[in-house]
Amino acid sequence: MKVAVLGSGIIGISSAWWLRQAGHDVVVVDRRPGPAQETSLANGGQISVSYAEPWANPQAPLKLLKWMFQDDAPLLFRPQLDWRQWMWGLAFLRECLPGRLAPNIRAMVRLAEYSRATLQAMRAELGIPYDHLERGILNFYRDPHEFETSQKAAGLMRDFGVERRVVTADEVVAIEPALAPHRGTIVGGDYTPEDESGDVHLFAAGLAQRCEAAGVEFRYETSATRLVSQGGQVQGVETIQPDGRYARLTADAYVVALGSFSPRLVRPLGVSCNVYPAKGYSATFAVRDPARAPSVSLTDSSHKVVFSRLGDRLRMAGTAELSGYSRALNTGRCDALTRLARELFPDALDFESVSYWSGLRPSTPSNVPLIGRTRIPNLYLNTGHGTLGWTMGVGSGRALADLLSGRKPEPEFPFLGL
């Protein structure tokens, strides 16, 4: 079949690769001049299978109320005059019910494990360089109550077969010596040695090159504006080309992997896609003293911020704003990231060369992504991965290719259309 993939982030590129491997003719459409230039450009860099947990849990509503007027809160809800935000919020509250937590975690962990294994196989086969490290993820705590609560979460993850080892404060410093100056404030941590880190943009760009070599066609600087349907099928996608003219692209099947913008394209066809943007921030620093910078990917649980070493750079990322589609930088949040970096690693980084970024993470209320066939037989979704697009990306693309090719995907997951 000829398949049109709309979007060239890690999700779209991975879908294109695996669809081509399955023998389909593939064309990728993206409004940017190259691959992975939006949400996949500068995220936190973690392949965090062991932390594949939903935001929605029984404790979340009270936390959101407490954070409502805290400008640097980890998860911030800013009410908008947008019925889609409120519908998403109501669905989020439903996912906070105790009975929803375990099935959501199970689905997320199964897909994340499958994706990590897929990434490891692709790395061995394709040899794409992306500053990856296989040193695990270390989550450290500075609040005793939070550390105690985390042990229950670690136990729940172990019930799903995920190794999440609780460690003492001394073990935290032994795993990552760059935290030694802060031993006095650290009360403990948990460590997942099987998790990884790496630069998603470098990987996606390298995979796009492999796709082109395999015969995938890319149409950059081309915006998909409308899906045209007739007789219960999508007949084409209207696009605006680089020269400003309209054109219609036709295919046998269509994959919408446009992240937070996916609902705008499919909703006019009556296709449900409850995805809303959660704006996240990152700051990237040049490493000035490698011996004092962390080499294990870290999560500061108190601030909900992650750190990943990417070659001679240190990427830190975190926070989530449910505040619409604006990517405007909040200077307060940017300053908070820099202050935390100075506190933890004052002599390791070049604070004069910081690069700030924000991206719109496409989030479902449950944090379980939407992957599979919609009510329209030749229209597929691959979106809604939230903060775990890098963690779940290549596995999601592979599973989508299986579904479109009439095969049952390997992971146990609530795929659409099955």
Image: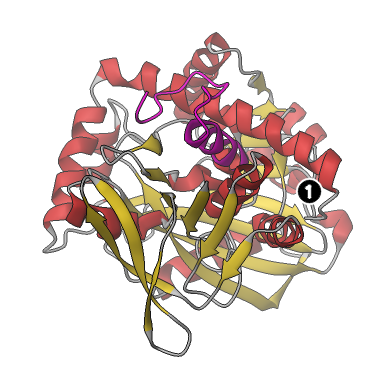
Q: Which residues are magenta?
A: 394-418
Q: Nearer the viewer, residue 400 or 119?
A: 400
Q: Quadrant of residue 316?
A: bottom right
Residue at image coords 27%, 18%: 98
- Label 1, secondary structure: give it: loop
Q: How many marks?
A: 1
Q: Quadrant of residue 292?
A: bottom right
Please provide percent x and percent y for residue 191.
68, 28
Residue occupying the far right of the picture: 291
Residue at image coords 46%, 75%: 222
User: Which quadrant: the C terminus?
Assistant: top left
Residue at image coords 65%, 48%: 17
Q: Nearer the viewer, residue 394 or 318?
A: 394
Q: Nearer the viewer, residue 204 or 188?
A: 204
Please provide percent x and percent y for residue 156.
49, 14
The residue indicated by pointer 1 is 132
Q: Do we see residue 320 in this rendering? A: yes
Tag 1: residue type?
Answer: His
